[in-house]
Amino acid sequence: LDVAMGKLTMGGAPVVESGESSLGSWTKFADGTMICYKANAIIFNPMGLSEQQSKTWNMPQSFVNTNYVIQHSLIGFYSGSWSDNAEILMNSLIVRNKKENSVDLATYSYTYAISNNIPFDLMAIGRWK
């Protein structure tokens, strides 16, 4: 965040509001764009073969609709191995049950079992107005 000519900006775009809570952080831009972010937003627990697991991220601010995109970032190995990290991605992550203020991510271990906790950072980009 920069202050130029008395206005708060991020990358040159005017920032209307920026904040943080236990649910994550957010930045609202004057053009209506909002970015929400949370480190360690969800953690998938160990799971055997052919199991399903779903986790919910309750976002720090609500979007105006569900036309936002979700980006995930795998956080190295949490307490396990690099193979668990690769295997959860090969099993796939699925975004579902999008709401204005929350989203579910699910994985199904149809190919690989996961033996350790796997945390993900999450970011959502959409509209606040």
Image: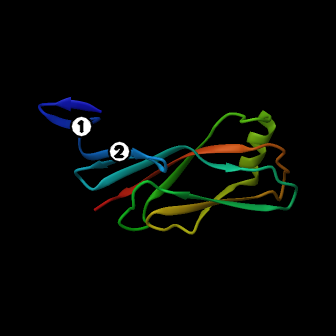
* Nearest to N terminus: mark 2 or mark 1: 1
Is residue 129 shown left or right of residue 106? left
Reply above or below: 113 against 101: above
Question: Considering depth in this image, is 28 or 90 the residue closer to the camera?
Answer: 28
The answer to which quarter of the image holds residue 110 is: bottom right
The number of numbered badges drawn on the structure is: 2
Q: State the residue lying farthest toward the right.
A: 49
How far across and how far down the image is residue 27, in percent? Answer: 34, 46
Q: Secondary structure at mark 2?
A: strand
- Residue 19: image tag: 2
How far across and how far down the image is residue 49, in percent? Answer: 88, 57
Is residue 77 shown left or right of residue 59? right
Are there few (<14), some (14-19), or many (20+) residues within 10 Å of tag 1? some
Are there few (<14), some (14-19), or many (20+) residues within 10 Å of tag 2? few
Is residue 76 shown left or right of residue 70? right
- Residue 9: image tag: 1
Q: Which residue is drawn at the image coordinates 79% and 41% (left, top)? A: 84
Quadrant where the C terminus is found in the figure = bottom left
Q: Which residue is drawn at the image coordinates 76% and 50% (left, top)? A: 45
